Image (spheres, rainbow, N blue to C red):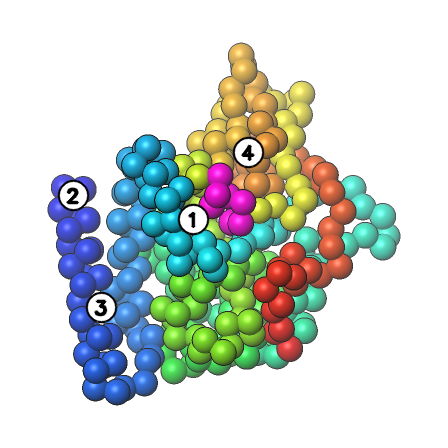
Amino acid sequence: MERKFVFEDLRQLGRWMRRKLKDRIEGKEYVFTREDFNDLSRMIRVGNWLMPRYGQTRFYRFLVDRGFFAPYFRQPVLSRVVPLNAKVKSGPNAVVPLQLLDEMIEKAGFRFIMDKCFCRQGMECQHYPIELGCIDLGEGARALLKGPHGREVTVDEAKAHVRKAAEYGIPAFAAHAIPENQVMGIPKEQNHKFIEICFCCPCCCVAMANLKYYSPLVKKYSMVSIGFVAKALPTCQGCFECVSKCAAGAIKIKGDKVWVQEDLCIGCGVCQHTCPHHAIRLTQISPLKENLLDYFKEIHLDLS
C-alpha cells in the first residue's frame, strides 16, 4: 500500500512538470497556482517515506559526498530554529526569541500568510492545524499574490499568527531555500528580498520529521539553533512522552528517566511543551544576536 501511494504521488509530480513545461514553451508567465500547491504537497509523503528507509544508507551518503546534489549545496537551504515557548532567565534588556520574530515582522516591507501548510496538507496531519501556514516576508513575497494561497496581512495579524503557533508548542523556522523560492515563483532577482517563517511539526514536516536521518553536511546549514538546548530536570517522572516527540533523536532513556544529548538537540522546545510534568526546560547557551537577519549575513537579505 505504501509503495502504491509513492507511485501515485510521483505521477502527480510528473503532471506538474508537464504542465509547467507546456506553459514555458507557450511563453506563459510562471504562476504558482493552487493546482501546483496540491500536486507538490503530495511529494511530502514521498520524502517522508524515502528518508527513514534510505537517508542513512551508504548510497545516499555517496551521492551527497560526490556532489550529486551540488545545485542544492551551492545555494544551501539555510534555516534557524526559533523556539516560541523558550522559558529562559533573562535580564530586563535581554532579547528573547519571540522578540526577534516580532522585530523581523515589523521591519518587513511586505507580509503574507499562506492559508495552508504545505507539509501538513500533504501528510493530512492529525495533530496540528493544516491551516497554520507559513509567513512569507519581504518584497519577493508579492509574487505569491498571483496564486490563491493566502493573503497580505498587517503586522498585528502576522504577530497573532506566530502566537497561535506558540499555543501548539511548535517552533518557528526562519528559512531561506532557493529551490523552494523557484517553485513558488519568487523572481530570481528578489531571492534576497524573501524569507519564510515556517511552523514545522515533528510529525509531518519533511525537514523536521527526518532530521535524524540527515547527513552532517545538511545539518551544517539547516535546522540550526539560535542558541538553545533542552535540559532534563531531576523531576522527570519517566513517562517518556518527550522521546517520541523529539525530531532530532536527542532525548535518550536512562533507567527510569531521560537525558538530552546536547550535540543533537536543535533547541526547538517541542519537548518542553510536551512534558506533562514540566521536567524539561530550554536553556540558553549562547547570546542571541540583535535580529534574525544577523543569522543570515552570508546571503545579505533585505526585507525592507
Total marks in image: 4
User: Residue most toward the bottom?
Assistant: 27
Spatial distance from mark 2 to mark 4, Cα to Cα?
Answer: 31 Å
What's the mark number on residue 3?
2
> Mark 3 belongs to which amino acid?
Met
Spatial distance from mark 1 to mark 2, Cα to Cα?
Answer: 21 Å
Q: Nearer the viewer, mark 3 or mark 2?
A: 3
Residue 120 point in image, percent of width and height: 37, 54
**Residue 196 visible, this orientation:** yes
| Dot placed on the residue nearer the N-terminal end, 3 or 2 | 2
What's the mark number on residue 17?
3
Residue named by callout 4: 264
| Dot placed on the residue nearer the N-terminal end, 4 or 3 | 3
Spatial distance from mark 4 to mark 3, Cα to Cα?
Answer: 37 Å
What's the mark number on residue 207?
1
**Residue at (48%, 60%) from the top-left corner?**
75
